[in-house]
Amino acid sequence: MNTVECIGVFVEVAKGLSFTKAAERLGTSRSVISKKIAWLEQSFETQLLQRNTKRVSLTESGEILLRNADSVSRALTELKDLVRSSVQLPTGRIRVGSPPSFGAVHLAPAVQAFLEAYTEVQITMQLDDGRSDLIAENMDLSVRIAPHLRDTSQIAYKIAVVPQVLVATSDFLERAKNPKHPADLKNHNCLVHTLKNPTSTWQLTDAQGKLHKVQVGGSFNSNLGESLLHLALRHYGISMHPRYMVEELISQGRLQVVLPDYKCEGLDIYAVIQSKRYLPYKVRLFIDHLRKHFQDVNWSSTSGRM
């Protein structure tokens, strides 16, 4: 039951020393009044009213509560409003986890735009591999990037899908022969991202919509895209990256698109939270902001790393 409401019911009974009159004034039944008084007495662990079939009187505890009821009700109401405002108003700190390069290059501008719109909010960004424990790290949400989100124990909001592309240097392709079909990738040194492709399976779709799944392998794997890209630039193999990550390198001629007639599996960007229950308004606003911000981004023309 509501403590403030029950105290108000007690005051009505105490002023008239009548359950019946209090019920009439409050527009309810005598049984409801009795239940609320009983709950209040149980909550305070003391008897507040003496009652029998003929009369109602205050106990010493009841007199103390009556004298202080106004200040108690006011304090509880103010406390309730204060707690509620911390949830409903866009104020306070949001703690966000993000993969390092994506957070530094792409998430930071989105954060800046949000902070400029909501000046009472502060944001702490923790750069990690996107797999931190939200509760243990005291984070409100984590940005995760993957073809498919496998962890179903948390709540995930998809905020964007980014295209990927296979790349290698012209020197490597001349030496190793440029693949013409996805199946040819089995015979090449493929540099695999262990977080995005833990099974070392690359998926490509042809112009007719047919999906080709290829089990690839090579002499170097990593959980960081930059290290894979670095070796690809050193003519060491074929790697798969978000289009925005290699667009500038392609335009400069430092990398070539491999199998340009096939479409690589896209990457989903998620905002992951621990629970929807009591999600602060500022976090809901931030997730909505990220969704709009990244949907408006032209990924193929955005430079950066992930």
Image (cartoon, helix red, strand yellow):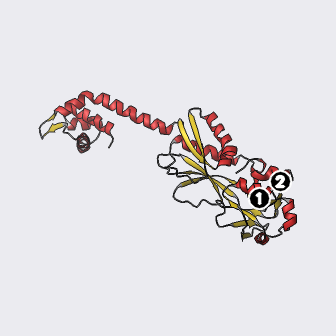
For label 2, the crowd category at 10 Å Cα-Cα, with few meaning under 14, some 14 to 19 and many 20 or more, is some
Residue, disc 1: 165
Look at the picture and state if 51 lies above or below 167.
above
Amino acid type for the residue under numbered disc 1:
Val
Residue at point 66%, 56% (across, down): 268
Ranked by sequence position, the earlier of labels 1 and 2 is 1
Q: Is residue 15 left or right of residue 97?
A: left
Binning the other alpha carbons within 10 Å of mark 1 as few (below 14), some (14 to 19) or many (20 upward) gives: many
Q: Which residue in the structure is indicated by mark 2?
A: 250
**Residue nearest the viewer, comparing 159 with 167:** 167
Residue drawn at point x = 58 percent, y = 39 percent:
123
Q: Quadrant of residue 210?
A: bottom right
Q: Name the kind of residue labelled 2 in the image.
A: Ile
- SS of the residue at dot 1? strand
For this view, does 159 lie left or right of residue 60?
A: right
User: Which of the numbered marks, if any, corresponds to residue 21?
Assistant: none
Residue shown at the point (33%, 41%) measured from the top left: 2
C-alpha gap between disc 1 and disc 2: 11 Å
